[in-house]
Image (cartoon, helix red, strand yellow):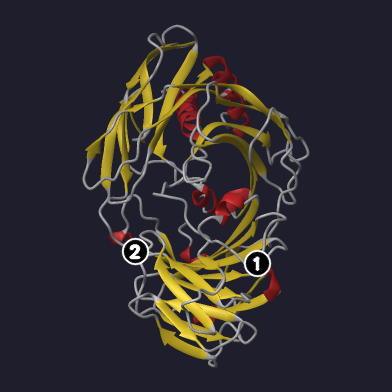
C-alpha cells in the first residue's frame, strides 16, 4: 500500500473519532459535589450532625466511620463514631470547634471535608467499582440522507453514552473511544473502534474509488445504571483531507475546523441488565448559530470550543453538537474566532458553549462553561492550577486551596489490576477525595493517610469555580453543579506507574 493511502486511512479515522472529542463516560444522573452543608433540622440533637448517603442510590449508609478533627491527618482527633442504621451520627461539638470531617466505609471512596463551619453536613460516598461485567449495546445509527455518493465528502458517525457535567470535570480524551474493535475493508482489513459508524458510500479519490459500509455500532455500557445513547452525523470534504496530509502526513487538530456536523439524536433512558439492541436515530438537524472567541489560557495549550445542548437544564444530559479548534499549541499566539452549530429546531432546555484548554499530554485541563449561549460568545478567563505531571514518588504533603468562589478538590487514585478491569471501568479508581473550602486557606494534605494497601498511581488537583453567588456556609451538593462556571484540573502520576 502506498504511503499516501496509509495516511488517508489514519487521517480519516482520526476525523471520525475526533467528532466525539466531547464524549465522556456517561452516568445515570448528574453527580453531586460530594457533600452538602445545610441548616440543622429541628428533630436533631445540638452539635454537629453528619449524614452519609450512597452517591448513586441516595440510600443511607450505616456503619460508616466519621472522624472529626482540628487538622487533616495526625494521630489526634476530637471525636470518632459510626453512623447508625439511619445513616447519621451526632457529636456534641459546635461548628467553631472542628476543622475537618473524614468519612470512611469499606467498598466506598473515602471523603474528607476541610473548612466547613456548619452544624449539619451530608456526605455522598461513591462505590469503588473494581470488578463488574459490562453489557454490550448494539444497533444501527440511522437518519442519513438517502444518497451519499458522488459529492466528494466522507461521512461518518459516532454512538456514545450520554454525558453530564461530572464527566466534563473528569474528562479523559480516550474515554469516548470504544475499547471494542470491528473490522472493515478499507484498502485491506482494518480494525476500528466499534462505536464508529460508516454509512454506505463510495468515496472518489485521485488514485481510485473506495466503498465504505459499516452501519452498525457496538458499545460497552455499565449494567444496572441508567443511561441514554447519543448519535451524531458528520462529514468532511475529501479535498480537505488530502490537503491536510499532503505536506508530510501529520494530521493537525486544525482539521476539526473543516469538519461539518449535520445531525444529532438521542434515545430514551435505558436501564440495561444484559446485552441489548437499540437503534439510534439522528433526526435533529444542525446549523451554525454561535460565534465564539476565547482568551489565551495561562499555560500553553490546545483550545477546543464545543457547543452542546443541556437537555433538561440540570446538566444531567448534555449533548455535544459541534466542536472546533480556537488555539493550536503549535502557534499559541494565534486565536481563531470559531463558528459552531446547534439544533435548527427547539430542542432541549438551553444551549451552552464549553471552552476547553488542554496542555501537552493533558497533564492540565481548564474549562469555561457559558450558559444560555447567544449568537456571539466571549467566555472570559481560564482558571489555572499548579503544573504537576510525572513525579518520582508521592510527596509527604500536597498543598490544597480553594478558589475564592468555589471548592478545591484533591483525589488520590489507585491502579486497578488488568485482570478485573472491564470495558467501562477505568484502570484507576479514586480511593480518597479531599474537599477544601475558602475559609480553610491552604491545607497541606498528608499522603501518609492514603491506605498503604492501595497501589497509588498519583493524584488529581481540581479547582471548581461557582461564581459570585457561591456561599460556602450553605451548599446543596445535589444542585450546585448546575452553577459550575469554570474549573481547572492538573494530574500527577508516579513515574513507575506510567506504562511505557
Q: Quadrant of residue 267?
A: top left
Quadrant where the N terminus sits is top left
- Taking the image as shown, residue 172 lies to the left or right of residue 254, namely left
* Above or below: residue 238 compared with residue 55: above
Q: Estimate how packed mark 1 is, as few (under 14), some (14 to 19) or many (20 or more) residues with alpha carbons within 10 Å.
A: many
Rendering coords of residue 173 (x, y %):
51, 45
Disc 2, SS: loop
* Above or below: residue 344 compared with residue 43: above
Whether residue 452 is visible here, answered yes or no, is: no
Mark 2, residue position = 417
User: Who comes first in sequence, dot 1 or dot 2?
Assistant: 2
- Taking the image as shown, residue 201 lies to the left or right of residue 167, namely left
**Residue at (33, 77) in percent of width and height:** 85
Between disc 1 and disc 2, the foreground one is 1
For marks 1 and 2, give the CA distance.
Answer: 38 Å
Q: Is 375 in front, or is 169?
A: 375
Mark 1, residue position = 472
- Taking the image as shown, residue 335 lies to the left or right of residue 488, namely right
Rendering coords of residue 361 (x, y %):
58, 50
**Residue at (66, 28) in percent of width and height:** 290
Rendering coords of residue 336 (x, y %):
73, 31
**Residue at (38, 10) in percent of width and height:** 146
Q: How many marks?
A: 2
Disc 1, SS: loop
* Above or below: residue 243 compared with residue 69: above
Q: Residue furthest front?
A: 42
**Residue at (69, 41) in percent of width and height:** 329
Rendering coords of residue 283 (x, y %):
42, 22
Q: Residue furthest right?
A: 333
Q: Is 241 in front, or is 314?
A: 314
Q: Residue furthest left?
A: 274
Q: Quadrant of residue 54?
A: bottom left
Amino acid at each position: 500500500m502506498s504511503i499516501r493511502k496509509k495516511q488517508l486511512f489514519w487521517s480519516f479515522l482520526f476525523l471520525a473519532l475526533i467528532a466525539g472529542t466531547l464524549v465522556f463516560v456517561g452516568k445515570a444522573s448528574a453527580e453531586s459535589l460530594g457533600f452538602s452543608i445545610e441548616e440543622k433540622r429541628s428533630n436533631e440533637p445540638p452539635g454537629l450532625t453528619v449524614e452519609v448517603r450512597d452517591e448513586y442510590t441516595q440510600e443511607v449508609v450505616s456503619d460508616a466511620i466519621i472522624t472529626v478533627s482540628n487538622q487533616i491527618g495526625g494521630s489526634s482527633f476530637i471525636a470518632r463514631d459510626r453512623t447508625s442504621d439511619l445513616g447519621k451520627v451526632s457529636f456534641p461539638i459546635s461548628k467553631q470547634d472542628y476543622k475537618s470531617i473524614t468519612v470512611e466505609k469499606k467498598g466506598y471512596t473515602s471523603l474528607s471535608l476541610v473548612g466547613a463551619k456548619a452544624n449539619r453536613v451530608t456526605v455522598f460516598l461513591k462505590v469503588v467499582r473494581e470488578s463488574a461485567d459490562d453489557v454490550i449495546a448494539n444497533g444501527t445509527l440511522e437518519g442519513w440522507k438517502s444518497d451519499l455518493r458522488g459529492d466528494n465528502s466522507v461521512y461518518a458517525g459516532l454512538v456514545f453514552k450520554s454525558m453530564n457535567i461530572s464527566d466534563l470535570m473528569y474528562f479523559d480524551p480516550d474515554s469516548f473511544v470504544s475499547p471494542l474493535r470491528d473490522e472493515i475493508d478499507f484498502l485491506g482489513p482494518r480494525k476500528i473502534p466499534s462505536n464508529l459508524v460508516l454509512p454506505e458510500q463510495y468515496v472518489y479519490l485521485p488514485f481510485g474509488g473506495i466503498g465504505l459500509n459499516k452501519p452498525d455500532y457496538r458499545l460497552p455500557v455499565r449494567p444496572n445504571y441508567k443511561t441514554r445513547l447519543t448519535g451524531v452525523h458528520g462529514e468532511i470534504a475529501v479535498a480537505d483531507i488530502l490537503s491536510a496530509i499532503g505536506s508530510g502526513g501529520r494530521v493537525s487538530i486544525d482539521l476539526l475546523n473543516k469538519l461539518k456536523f449535520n445531525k444529532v439524536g438521542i434515545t430514551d433512558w435505558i436501564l440495561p441488565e444484559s446485552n441489548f439492541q437499540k437503534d439510534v436515530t439522528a433526526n435533529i438537524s444542525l446549523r451554525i448559530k454561535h460565534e465564539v472567541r476565547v482568551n489565551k489560557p495561562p499555560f500553553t495549550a490546545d483550545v477546543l470550543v464545543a457547543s452542546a445542548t443541556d437537555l433538561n437544564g440540570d446538566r444531567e444530559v448534555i449533548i455535544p453538537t459541534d466542536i472546533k479548534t480556537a488555539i493550536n499549541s503549535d502557534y499559541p499566539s494565534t486565536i481563531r474566532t470559531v463558528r459552531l452549530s446547534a439544533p435548527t429546531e427547539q430542542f432541549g432546555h438551553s444551549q451552552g458553549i464549553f471552552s476547553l484548554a488542554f496542555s501537552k499530554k493533558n497533564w492540565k485541563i481548564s474549562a469555561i462553561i457559558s450558559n444560555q449561549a447567544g449568537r456571539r460568545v466571549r467566555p472570559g478567563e481560564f482558571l489555572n492550577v499548579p503544573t504537576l505531571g510525572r513525579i518520582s514518588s508521592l510527596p509527604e504533603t500536597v498543598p490544597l486551596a480553594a478558589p475564592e468562589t468555589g471548592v478545591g478538590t484533591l483525589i488520590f487514585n489507585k491502579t486497578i489490576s488488568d485482570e478485573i478491569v472491564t470495558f467501562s471501568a477505568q484502570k484507576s479508581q479514586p480511593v480518597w477525595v479531599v474537599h477544601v473550602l475558602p475559609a480553610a486557606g491552604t491545607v497541606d494534605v498528608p499522603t501518609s493517610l492514603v491506605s498503604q494497601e492501595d497501589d497509588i498511581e498519583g493524584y488529581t488537583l481540581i479547582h471548581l469555580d461557582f461564581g459570585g453567588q457561591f456561599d460556602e456556609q450553605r451548599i446543596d451538593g445535589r444542585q450546585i453543579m448546575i452553577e459550575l462556571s469554570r474549573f481547572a484540573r492538573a494530574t500527577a502520576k508516579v513515574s513507575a506507574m506510567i506504562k511505557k
